[in-house]
Amino acid sequence: MRQIDKEKFYKELNSLIGEYTVYAPVGDRVKKIKDTKEIKFEGLLTRFPAKEHMLPQNEELFRWNRDKKIEVKIPDTKAIIFGIRPCDARAIASLDPTFNTEKFPDPYYINRRKNTIIISIGCNNPDDTCFCTSFGSGPFDPTGSDLLVVDTGEKFLGIGKEKILDMFGFEEGNDGGEFEALKKKAEGKIERINLAGIKDKLDSLKETDFFKKISYKCINCGACTFLCPTCYCFDIEDMERIDGGKRVRIWDSCMFTIYTQETSGHNPRKQEERRMRQRIMHKFSYYPFLYDIFGCVGCGRCISYCPVNFDIRNVLKTIGGMDE
Amino acid sequence: MIENIRREAEKILKEGVVDLVIGFEEGTIPLKSTPVFIEKPEEAQKLVWNSFCENNLAVYINRFKDKKVGIVANGCCSRAIVNLIIEGQIKREDVYIIGVPCEGMLDRRKMLREGKTEKDVDESYLYTNCRYCGHRNPVIYDYLAGEKLEEHSAQYPDIKEMESLTEEERWQKFSEEVNRCIRCYACRQACPMCYCEVCFVDVNNPKWLEGGVTEADVGYWNLGRAYHLAGRCVDCGACERACPMEIKILNLTRKLNKDVKELYNYEPGIDINEKPVLGEFTYEDKEDFIR
Amino acid sequence: MNNPYLPIEAEVKMARFESDDHSLKTIDLTPVNGDIFDFIPGQFCELSILGKGEAPFGIASSPYEDFFRFTINRAGLVTTELHHLEEGDKIGLRGPLGNGYPVHLFKKKNIVIVSGGFAFTTLRSLIKYLLKNRTEFDKITLVYGSRRPDLLLYRDELEEWEKSGNIEMYITIDKEVQGWKKYVGFVPTVLKEVHPSPDNAYLVMCGPPAMVKFTIPVIEELGFPPDKVFTSLERRMKCGFGKCGRCNIGPYYVCKDGPVFSMEQLKNLPREY
């Protein structure tokens, strides 16, 4: 098991600032840091997932001047995102099949992804809203991260790409079974929801009253979608300026009433239950159908931040308990 | 009191007085009660009333336009219902109000940050607008579930403190709060008085503001919404409690409420026969602040 | 890497109103740099007015013509700007997007085309394609109706096709109008009267929701199996290639896996249209 003194790791990370743009948790958000001293872990998860650095809330697609000449700037700075949790890293990887496609590749996302090293940190103390183990993952899952570090107090244990481990100077050593012990303890704290057959059960629900009843209390804000690490829906807006203008991609939410509103006045998802059905089916039926992975990583942010305490775990358990 | 609420809810469902009762039930995360929609009389046992029933249930009334609705309402929720009646959004006969005198809601996020649990329920954690609440008893009801509490008039010491700051300090305070906004519209959706079919931020002709999160955009959004609530806001705090970024929206809305009270001696949502204060004028209205 | 969000510059070569009330306008565009790109009838393009926005429009021209033709119904911000275009103006164009009609399935078959109002745009593309390769297809039947004669699109070409005898044409309007010599009646009624045979045939339908709702039972009555009936759907679109997430029906995006779907495919999807 490769390992390194925490102090040495942070010193090495500090020296990379400049060559790389480094993002790390500072309180409740993942921010750009100028010095590793700024890093502050507040609670388990940052309020905002790190997706804002892969898919910014406002991203300029291109701009034009008075003569309508178009100018494009594709992001190409090297970056390191450190200190996010394994669920956030897995969530970024789940965006790849949508944005990194052969036909119509998204150059902004692809370039950012190519130029970013993701270093996640394992969860020694999961929250009681976590349910990542339901997806075959866990608090120490390195999927989606270039490097996963585990905090043992003095040291970081490291699992990941050789190149990255060498870059920081991780050395071979014997962890004395500590990794396995921490992993088992953390996994024991996480609720595991049975998702077997969930896609088929959802597909059979279709037009029933089920979605109507569960969507009564949802107030249709965008809190869950904006804080969700796997949500990616966006709107494209033209912004005019005195000397030209720009076309910008901005976050949108399928929970908003006007999301599918057409100019004619027709809205195929006017009713709340249709929007709720879209959200749940997209994450647990359509995404697995298209790409074999769920559109949810079990981070629990939607549960903690929903103003009315809509709990997706209850919905999944109810559906899981239905006969097919 | 909770027994009264449950009994009354069961009664009105059994007797067919209402098709559905909107209330609160136990939440799935610590220190939270969540809205519940009861259609069968036996489910009335699920209802709870505690210091974590922080949402304003009046937002849900208009979802059930074709049904007769019962609602468990405290002071600010009943004021919202009165306001909706004044503004022609609901009819008095379509709601059956189970009135609940309320001692205020506790700031669950503050309690969780300090590692407190249900055992530490203490009035030091009251939300600001609950601490200085002027209407702890429901202003309108069909059934009163408990004994009325002593009323004090609404106070605004938090706003007075803000008013004593300099212009730069006030701008600093405003920017700090509002720049965290992510335009998720949880505040707007949680507010019973925000019922416009097309909100001003979603109109694209004329395009009042853009979809970005620059200082200008979030500033305009928050101020615009606060001003659209002037003279209509019932100070329930649902907006601030819904905000996932914990922005102190009440700094804006309570200031406007204080101004309306001082200038026009009016508190919204008290009497269903009143007209909205900014919806009509009399010749006696003060004009000295118009320069 | 090709940036699919970037529009190419296109110049307006022709702009004329179709309807008397000026609600419909047809424009022809050619790219400023480069040639007309190849496409399949049924595909669409996103037209950009920098500063106002983008909107999707079905391509009304065929791949054999040297311009892109679009017919635009004035409804909102972007379409109003498009209505102000004159010859020589330049706008942005992104395409071709979508899947197009399955013309490879139509070889040696009878094709029945049913349309109403200004949904006829992509069908002009399809008909011109079929006529160019006429010998590869058997009988072609067209049932096309509109509220009034001036709301029918491409009237001069409709006359041409009728005279050529290559298509059996049934053009209808909703209510009797003085001087109108063709059919009178709603499209589903006329289709029933025409009674095309489902044997060895495919049916393509493109129309406003009201027409589609009443035409589907007629098609079922005539005996057309759902996997031989195709329709083109419309949704609010933004990116046009399945990334922004808003135009999906079930797991399929109307912009990427559609807009042409068979009734067989739609049967298994949530009824969100």
Image: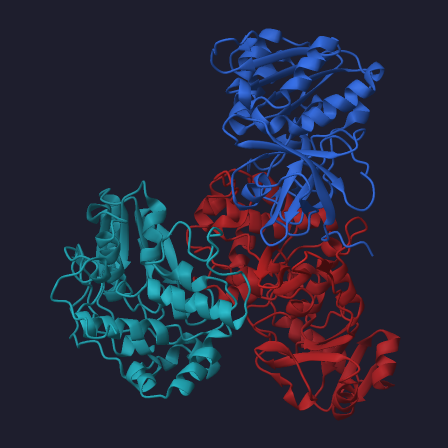
Chain colours: A red, B cyan, C blue
Q: Residue at 32% x, 58% y: name it.
A: B193
Instruction: Determine if residue B244 is in view.
Output: no
Q: Residue at 52% x, 25% y: name it.
A: C20
Expressed as whole percent of the image width and height from the top left, the position of residue B280 reads 19, 58
C250 with respect to B127 (left or right): right
A312 with respect to A117 (left or right): left
Instruction: Determine if residue A80 is in view.
Output: yes
Residue C141 sits in quarter:
top right
C175 with respect to B285 (left or right): right
Residue C133 sits in quarter:
top right
Q: Nearer the viewer, residue B155 or C147?
A: C147
Q: Nearer the viewer, residue C109 or A193?
A: C109
Expressed as whole percent of the image width and height from the top left, the position of residue A61 reads 68, 60
Expressed as whole percent of the image width and height from the top left, the position of residue B219 reads 46, 71
Count every numbered label the image shows and give the total: 0
Q: Residue at 27% x, 60% y: name it.
A: B80
Quadrant of the drawing holding the C terminus of chain A: top right
Q: Residue at 80% x, 38% y: name it.
A: C36
Does residue A62 lie above or below A30 as drawn? above
Does residue B73 lie above or below C247 as drawn? below
Quadrant of the drawing holding the N terminus of chain A: bottom right
Residue A159 sits in quarter:
bottom right
Does residue C235 lie above or below A259 as drawn? above
Expressed as whole percent of the image width and height from the top left, the position of residue C8 reads 75, 48
